[in-house]
Image (tube, rainbow, N blue to C red):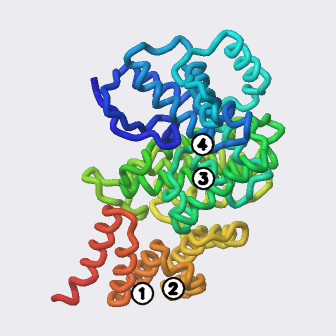
């Protein structure tokens, strides 16, 4: 019998596959049952546990203990007929114990009255309104009473299972600051008794923007991790795939929302290039060097259909611009070249609609390719110095534009900074190769 090597922290990893540390053997059947329960029931269970007292952190802890107990007991006593009811019973008993109950009930079965009460409670919730528990929980975390800036990070941690430091890097803030903010928002949910209730479809409009950002953020984190082969933090492929699934589900639920369609299109068009981003030996492959024959034509076709439908709705927005940018890139598979002028215009629109550091750097590169390296460098210099100083892509972009401008010495200096800030060994090795290529003429 194998030992499970990961660890339980919030009770579930992304996609609700568990990360658990156990020192005792676990049967394969118990391990599979726990993973299935986490995948299929985590969102529903967490919502039911948190809805009673608006204590999100406490519900997460109780559910983690329940899953830990399941691993210990299901391997020796067998998997119960109703794993979800078992987990809910143990978690609710754990909640009661934490609240000061003298009885230890974490291993006792539910009596018939309590079992009936659980199903009555569950039946009162419109579980069919949104056909996926993870998506339901995303909308729960987008409650209007929660600080708007923290809704997406809360979803990334609570629903999608990401650590605070991973989320912090995506938002370009210190890990300790993100961890503190997440603690504060959970404390506010508890003390302000913010209703932690499963929403219906009618709740979607006012919460939709935060949900879209969380799904996009999850994909971006997974996408970056795939290229960097970042192990031990997130399952990158699973994270990106889950984000794509959620985006497509939203598109099916809200087929007349242009931004929902834009997000699904953006993720599909981006993910189509996944197989070409890493060489067989694990080396990083930049977009311009990727073999277009490895791109997934079906994902590209699906993304293009989604984008066309979004554009027909005549309601332009951020995610449609993001999708259009990806569409220009994948068009190289048919045309053999990249339309940098089109990209420069799209990035200009993105900067007006949803300005951010990444878009500013993308705009500078597009201008440099479409007009001149000098124009691209000028656009890069327009970005706030403090913001770009620690932003690795800005230094990589500067090095690229300086190389185009035939300024190898300055390009090497920029590469040194980009290498120092590189988040992975794969990207660092690629940049070191670029530096070596620039330094060779000087050594001759």
Q: Nearer the viewer, mark 4 or mark 2?
A: 4
**Sequence-first tag of 4 and 3:** 4
To which residue does mark 1 refer?
405
Q: Quadrant of residue 247?
A: top right
Q: Nearer the viewer, mark 2 or mark 3?
A: 3
Residues at discs 4 and 1 in contact (Cβ within 8 Å): no
Image coordinates of residue 14 in percent, x first then y, are 51, 41
To which residue does mark 3 refer?
216
Pick the front one: 154 or 302: 154
**Sequence-first tag of 2 and 3:** 3
Q: Quadrant of residue 119?
A: top right
357 lies above or below 35:
below
Sort mark 1 into few (<14), some (14-19) or many (20+) by Cα contacts within 10 Å: some
Q: Nearer the viewer, mark 4 or mark 1?
A: 4
Residues at discs 4 and 2 in contact (Cβ within 8 Å): no
Residue furthest front in the image:
102
**Sequence-first tag of 3 and 1:** 3
- Distance of label 3 from label 1 (alpha carbons): 34 Å
Image coordinates of residue 227 in percent, x first then y, are 39, 56
To which residue does mark 4 refer?
159
Q: Nearer the viewer, mark 3 or mark 1?
A: 3
Quarter of the image containing the C terminus?
Answer: bottom left
- Distance of label 2 from label 3 (alpha carbons): 29 Å
């Amino acid at each position: 019998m194998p030992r499970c090597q990961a660890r339980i922290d919030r009770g579930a990893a992304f996609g609700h596959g568990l990360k658990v540390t156990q020192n005792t053997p676990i049967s394969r059947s118990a391990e599979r049952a726990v993973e299935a329960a986490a995948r299929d029931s985590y969102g529903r269970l967490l919502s039911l546990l948190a809805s009673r007292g608006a204590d999100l952190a406490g519900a997460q802890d109780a559910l983690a203990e329940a899953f830990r107990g399941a691993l210990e007991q299901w391997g020796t006593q067998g998997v119960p007929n109703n794993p979800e009811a078992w987990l809910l019973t143990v978690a609710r008993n754990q909640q009661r114990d934490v609240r000061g109950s003298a009885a230890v009930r974490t291993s006792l079965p539910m009596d018939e009255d309590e079992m009936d009460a659980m199903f009555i409670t569950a039946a009162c919730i419109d579980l069919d309104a949104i056909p996926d528990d993870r998506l339901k929980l995303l909308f729960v975390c987008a409650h209007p009473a929660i600080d708007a800036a923290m809704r997406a990070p809360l979803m990334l941690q609570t629903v999608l299972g990401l650590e605070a430091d991973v989320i912090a890097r995506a938002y370009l803030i210190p890990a300790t600051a993100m961890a503190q903010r997440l603690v504060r928002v959970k404390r506010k949910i508890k003390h302000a008794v913010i209703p932690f209730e499963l929403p219906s479809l009618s709740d979607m409009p006012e919460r939709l923007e935060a949900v879209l950002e969380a799904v996009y953020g999850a994909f971006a984190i997974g996408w970056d991790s795939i290229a960097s082969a970042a192990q031990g933090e997130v399952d990158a492929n699973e994270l990106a795939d889950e984000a794509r699934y959620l985006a497509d589900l939203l598109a099916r639920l809200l087929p007349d929302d242009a931004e929902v369609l834009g997000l699904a299109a953006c993720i599909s068009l981006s993910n189509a290039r996944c197989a070409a981003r890493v060489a067989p030996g694990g080396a990083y492959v930049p977009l311009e060097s990727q073999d277009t024959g490895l791109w997934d034509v079906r994902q590209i076709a699906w993304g293009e259909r989604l984008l066309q439908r979004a554009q027909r709705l005549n309601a332009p927005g951020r995610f449609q611009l993001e999708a259009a940018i990806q569409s220009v890139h994948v068009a190289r598979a048919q045309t053999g070249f990249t339309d940098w002028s089109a990209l420069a215009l799209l990035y200009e629109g993105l900067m007006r609609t949803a300005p951010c550091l990444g878009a500013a750097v993308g705009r500078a590169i597009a201008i440099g390719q479409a007009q001149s390296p000098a124009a691209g460098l000028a656009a890069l210099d327009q970005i706030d110095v403090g913001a770009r100083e620690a932003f690795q892509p800005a230094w990589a972009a500067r090095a690229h534009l300086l190389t185009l401008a035939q300024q190898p010495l300055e390009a090497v200096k920029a590469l040194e900074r980009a290498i120092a800030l590189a988040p992975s060994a794969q990207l660092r090795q690629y940049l070191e190769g670029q530096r070596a290529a620039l330094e060779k003429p000087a050594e001759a």
